[in-house]
Image (cartoon, grey):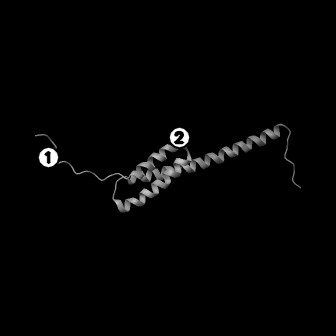
Amino acid sequence: MHVGAGWPRPPGRPTNGLAIAALCCSIGQLILGPFAGIAAIVLGAISLKQFRVSGEDGHGMALAGLVLGIVGIILFVVLLVVVIALVNTYATNVNNFNGISPQPSN
Protein backbone atom coordinates (compact mmCIF):
# COMPACT_ATOMS: atom_id res chain seq x y z
CA MET A 1 0.00 0.00 0.00
CA HIS A 2 1.24 3.50 -0.83
CA VAL A 3 1.78 6.09 1.80
CA GLY A 4 -0.87 8.76 1.51
CA ALA A 5 -3.32 6.51 -0.28
CA GLY A 6 -6.93 6.86 0.69
CA TRP A 7 -9.28 9.74 0.54
CA PRO A 8 -8.02 12.79 -1.33
CA ARG A 9 -7.19 15.83 0.70
CA PRO A 10 -9.84 18.52 0.73
CA PRO A 11 -9.01 21.49 -1.46
CA GLY A 12 -7.47 24.47 0.30
CA ARG A 13 -8.99 27.87 0.48
CA PRO A 14 -8.70 29.85 -2.75
CA THR A 15 -6.30 32.77 -2.96
CA ASN A 16 -7.79 36.20 -3.49
CA GLY A 17 -7.11 37.36 -7.04
CA LEU A 18 -6.85 41.01 -6.06
CA ALA A 19 -4.13 40.14 -3.56
CA ILE A 20 -2.13 38.47 -6.32
CA ALA A 21 -2.70 41.48 -8.59
CA ALA A 22 -1.61 43.88 -5.83
CA LEU A 23 1.65 42.00 -5.36
CA CYS A 24 2.27 41.85 -9.11
CA CYS A 25 1.61 45.58 -9.50
CA SER A 26 3.92 46.44 -6.63
CA ILE A 27 6.70 44.44 -8.27
CA GLY A 28 5.79 45.95 -11.65
CA GLN A 29 6.58 49.45 -10.37
CA LEU A 30 10.19 48.78 -11.23
CA ILE A 31 9.19 48.92 -14.90
CA LEU A 32 5.98 50.97 -14.99
CA GLY A 33 6.77 53.46 -12.25
CA PRO A 34 4.21 55.10 -10.00
CA PHE A 35 1.20 54.05 -12.08
CA ALA A 36 1.65 50.44 -11.03
CA GLY A 37 2.29 51.59 -7.46
CA ILE A 38 -1.07 53.37 -7.34
CA ALA A 39 -2.77 50.25 -8.66
CA ALA A 40 -0.97 48.14 -6.03
CA ILE A 41 -2.20 50.40 -3.23
CA VAL A 42 -5.80 50.35 -4.46
CA LEU A 43 -5.89 46.60 -5.13
CA GLY A 44 -4.19 45.81 -1.83
CA ALA A 45 -6.65 47.92 0.16
CA ILE A 46 -9.68 46.41 -1.61
CA SER A 47 -8.44 42.85 -1.12
CA LEU A 48 -7.75 43.44 2.58
CA LYS A 49 -11.38 44.50 2.99
CA GLN A 50 -12.55 41.41 1.08
CA PHE A 51 -10.77 39.03 3.47
CA ARG A 52 -13.20 39.85 6.25
CA VAL A 53 -16.10 38.54 4.17
CA SER A 54 -14.66 35.90 1.84
CA GLY A 55 -12.31 33.90 4.06
CA GLU A 56 -9.85 33.51 1.19
CA ASP A 57 -6.09 33.16 1.50
CA GLY A 58 -3.56 35.74 0.36
CA HIS A 59 -3.59 38.22 3.23
CA GLY A 60 0.22 38.39 3.20
CA MET A 61 0.32 39.06 -0.53
CA ALA A 62 -2.23 41.85 -0.21
CA LEU A 63 -0.34 43.44 2.67
CA ALA A 64 2.99 43.14 0.84
CA GLY A 65 1.49 44.69 -2.28
CA LEU A 66 0.03 47.57 -0.28
CA VAL A 67 3.27 48.26 1.63
CA LEU A 68 5.50 47.96 -1.44
CA GLY A 69 3.14 50.22 -3.38
CA ILE A 70 3.35 52.89 -0.69
CA VAL A 71 7.13 52.57 -0.43
CA GLY A 72 7.46 52.80 -4.22
CA ILE A 73 5.36 55.96 -4.39
CA ILE A 74 7.37 57.56 -1.57
CA LEU A 75 10.66 56.67 -3.29
CA PHE A 76 9.35 58.10 -6.57
CA VAL A 77 8.42 61.41 -4.91
CA VAL A 78 11.83 61.61 -3.19
CA LEU A 79 13.58 60.88 -6.49
CA LEU A 80 11.50 63.53 -8.23
CA VAL A 81 12.41 66.14 -5.59
CA VAL A 82 16.11 65.25 -5.86
CA VAL A 83 16.04 65.53 -9.66
CA ILE A 84 14.28 68.90 -9.50
CA ALA A 85 16.83 70.15 -6.95
CA LEU A 86 19.74 68.97 -9.10
CA VAL A 87 18.33 70.60 -12.22
CA ASN A 88 17.76 73.83 -10.31
CA THR A 89 21.30 73.75 -8.91
CA TYR A 90 22.77 73.02 -12.33
CA ALA A 91 20.82 75.86 -13.97
CA THR A 92 21.89 78.30 -11.27
CA ASN A 93 25.55 77.29 -11.58
CA VAL A 94 25.52 77.56 -15.37
CA ASN A 95 24.02 81.05 -15.18
CA ASN A 96 26.62 82.17 -12.61
CA PHE A 97 29.45 80.68 -14.65
CA ASN A 98 28.36 82.57 -17.77
CA GLY A 99 28.35 85.85 -15.87
CA ILE A 100 24.56 86.01 -15.72
CA SER A 101 23.43 86.91 -12.26
CA PRO A 102 19.89 87.27 -11.08
CA GLN A 103 18.60 90.82 -10.90
CA PRO A 104 18.34 92.11 -7.35
CA SER A 105 14.80 92.75 -6.29
CA ASN A 106 13.99 96.25 -5.16
- Which type of secondary structure does the marked residue at label 1 adopt? loop
Q: Cα distance, mark 2 to mark 1?
A: 48 Å
Tally the numbered discs.
Answer: 2
Residue at position x 56%, y 48% in the image = 34
Identify the disc placed on residue 59. none
Count residues near mark 1 (Cα–Cα under 10 Å), then give few for <14, some for 14-19, many for 20+. few
In the rendered structure, the answer to whether residue 3 lies left or right of residue 16 reads: left
Q: Mark 2 points at which residue?
A: 31
Tell me which label, 2 or 1, sits earlier in the chain.
Answer: 1
- Which type of secondary structure does the marked residue at label 2 adopt? helix
* Position of residue 43 measured from the top left corner of the image (x, y, whole percent): 46, 54
* Position of residue 79 measured from the top left corner of the image (x, y, whole percent): 62, 45
Q: Mark 1 points at which residue?
A: 6
In the rendered structure, the answer to whether residue 56 lies left or right of residue 99 reads: left
Residue at position x 52%, y 47% in the image = 36
Count residues near mark 2 (Cα–Cα under 10 Å), then give few for <14, some for 14-19, many for 20+. few
For the C terminus, the quadrant is bottom right
Q: What residue type is labelled 2?
A: Ile
In the rendered structure, the answer to whether residue 69 lies left or right of residue 101 reads: left
Residue at position x 74%, y 40% in the image = 90
The residue nearer to you, when weighing 77 against 21, is 21
* Position of residue 105 measured from the top left corner of the image (x, y, whole percent): 87, 53
Q: Which amino acid does label 1 sit on?
A: Gly
Q: Residue furthest left?
A: 1
For the N terminus, the quadrant is top left
In the rendered structure, the answer to whether residue 58 lies left or right of residue 85 reads: left
Q: Are marks 2 and 1 in contact (CB under 8 Å)?
A: no
Q: Which residue lies furthest to the top in this view?
A: 98
Residue at position x 30%, y 53% in the image = 13
